[in-house]
DNA sequence: TGTCCACAGGAAATACGGGGGT
DNA sequence: ACCCCCGTATTTCCTGTGGACA
């Protein structure tokens, strides 16, 4: 056998990868990487296939009044994540402002994106930034001051103002103060015709709302249903066409992804993510995307999610996870209680030099892990032996391996 | 039946960090 | 430089509790 050099092996591999490349344009597998106009083009294609048609019709009739000089009421839009609320709205509002411009109707629309939780203060601050009424403060300025600046910035605008407020329920703490400003105070202080569009993924969102705000809030409601398999197939095939070379996807693959996704969440983003993972794996293996590949793509995707979640989490939460894993190893898989876990946590802190937190705070960390379903815990009373959380790890061994590796790396770096 | 364990989890207090106004 | 304001993280203090055991 002819001896191979590292150089020849490398050349072989690279040539192999190039000749077996199935991804034509990676960016179309990840919305984050697309620029605005490309996103809109993709959307237009999707909507042309009658996806989300009912919703777009509904939006059109709600806002039709704008072109006739009416003042439509506010709107609340509900739907689970990945049902295209944000994208549909963005697309629709762009179109609407084009039409308004053609008719010489003054119309402005702004997108307030609360994709991460924030308090009332930051919410107002973001709003102020949209109107260039203030720079991005971190702290130290009163709420009143912010409100006044927003009002001042809008004092001379007379036309329509559509405020698209994405994921309202992410306004934590004093949400009522924020909403009350938008709903009650702002419309009275500025000359613009204000139309609020609230988007939320909680269906019962306005139920626990300050009644005073609620009574002011005339709403038209619109619900985005999860995508069905047919919608997802459309969405996926457009991606396939743009991102992959022809023939890279074996028959049945799109159908399977669509079926899987529509069964358990109807989330288009996750469906596209699965497609992307499949494409990546296929390219690495030097073949096409096959049905069999999808299973490993799905598990890998799952694992990635947990790892990414934990890696971007605060250190204390990582430490808590580490102690659960450790305590659970020591107990050989049997369920463990809060006390044992806290002991493990304390040892972990001693080893890594991390500041210890009290038991109370540790309990909250455990609750958080439970929320992310990294662990499963239930409160159990063992009679005179007290009450405790019964904790089990809720992720596969493979994921745990990966998680603990990541945690350790993090702490080594901290010294 | 009452006791009492080993915590859960709410509320208030405190610490902390950062920024504005003067 | 000083003081005050605000938001967040954590601690302190507290009351509550299901059921095994005597």
Image (cartoon, coloured by chain):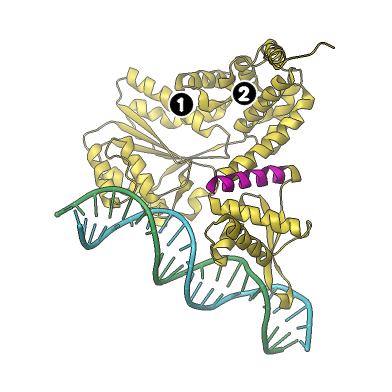
Chain colours: A yellow, B green, C cyan
- Name above or below for residue A386 compared with residue A272: below
Q: Main secondary structure of the magenta part?
A: helix
Label 2 packing within 10 angstroms: few (<14), some (14-19), many (20+): many
Q: Earlier in the sequence, mark 2 or mark 1?
A: 1
Q: Nearer the viewer, residue A239 or A401?
A: A401
Q: Residue visible at 63% across and 64% down?
A: A342
* Residue identified by numbered label 2: A235
Q: Residue visible at 54% across and 56% down?
A: A354
The image position of residue A87, as x and y in percent, is 50, 29
Q: Is residue A400 magenta?
A: yes
* Residue identified by numbered label 1: A92
Q: Nearer the viewer, residue A192 or A338?
A: A338
- Name above or below for residue A157 compared with residue A173: above
Residue A215 visible here: no
Label 1 packing within 10 angstroms: few (<14), some (14-19), many (20+): some
- Name above or below for residue A51 compared with residue A136: above
Residues drawn in magenta: A399-415
Residue A242 in the figure: left or right of residue A222 = right
């Amino acid at each position: 056998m002819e001896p191979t050099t590292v150089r020849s092996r490398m050349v072989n591999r690279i040539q192999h990868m190039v000749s077996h490349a199935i991804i034509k344009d990676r960016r179309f597998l990840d919305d984050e990487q697309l620029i605005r106009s490309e996103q809109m083009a993709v959307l237009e294609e999707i909507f042309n296939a009658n996806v989300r048609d009912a919703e777009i019709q509904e939006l059109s009739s709600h806002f039709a009044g704008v072109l006739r000089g009416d003042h439509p009421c506010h709107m609340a839009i509900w739907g689970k994540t990945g049902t295209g609320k944000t994208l549909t709205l963005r697309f629709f509002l762009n179109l609407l402002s084009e039409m308004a411009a053609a008719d010489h109707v003054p119309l402005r629309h702004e997108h307030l994106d609360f994709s991460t939780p924030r308090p009332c203060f930051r919410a107002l601050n973001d709003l102020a930034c949209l109107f260039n009424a203030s720079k991005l403060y971190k702290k130290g300025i009163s709420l009143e001051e912010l409100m006044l600046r927003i009002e001042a910035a809008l004092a001379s605008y007379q036309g329509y103002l559509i405020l698209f407020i994405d994921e309202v329920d992410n306004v934590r703490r004093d949400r009522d103060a924020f909403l009350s400003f938008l709903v009650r105070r702002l419309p009275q202080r500025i000359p613009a015709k204000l139309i609020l569009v609230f988007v939320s993924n909680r269906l019962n969102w306005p139920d626990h709302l300050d009644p005073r705000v609620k009574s002011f809030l005339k709403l038209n409601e619109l619900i985005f249903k999860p995508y069905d398999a047919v919608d997802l197939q459309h969405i996926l095939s457009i991606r396939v066409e743009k991102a992959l070379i022809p023939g890279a996807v074996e028959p049945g693959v799109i159908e399977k992804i669509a079926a899987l996704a529509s069964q358990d969440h109807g989330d288009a983003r996750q469906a596209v993510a699965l497609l992307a993972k499949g494409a990546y794996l296929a390219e690495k293996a030097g073949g096409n995307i096959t049905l069999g590949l999808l299973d490993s793509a799905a598990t890998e995707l799952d694992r990635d999610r947990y790892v990414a979640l934990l890696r971007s989490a605060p250190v204390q939460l990582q430490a808590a996870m580490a102690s659960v894993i450790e305590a659970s190893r020591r107990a050989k898989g049997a369920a463990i209680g809060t006390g044992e876990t806290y002991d493990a946590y304390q040892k972990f802190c001693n080893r890594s030099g991390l500041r210890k937190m009290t038991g109370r705070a540790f309990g909250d960390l455990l609750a958080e892990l439970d929320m992310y379903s990294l662990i499963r815990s239930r409160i159990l009373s063992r009679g005179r032996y007290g009450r405790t959380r019964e904790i089990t790890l809720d992720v596969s061994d493979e994921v745990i391996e990966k998680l603990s590796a990541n945690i350790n790396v993090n702490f080594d770096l901290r010294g």
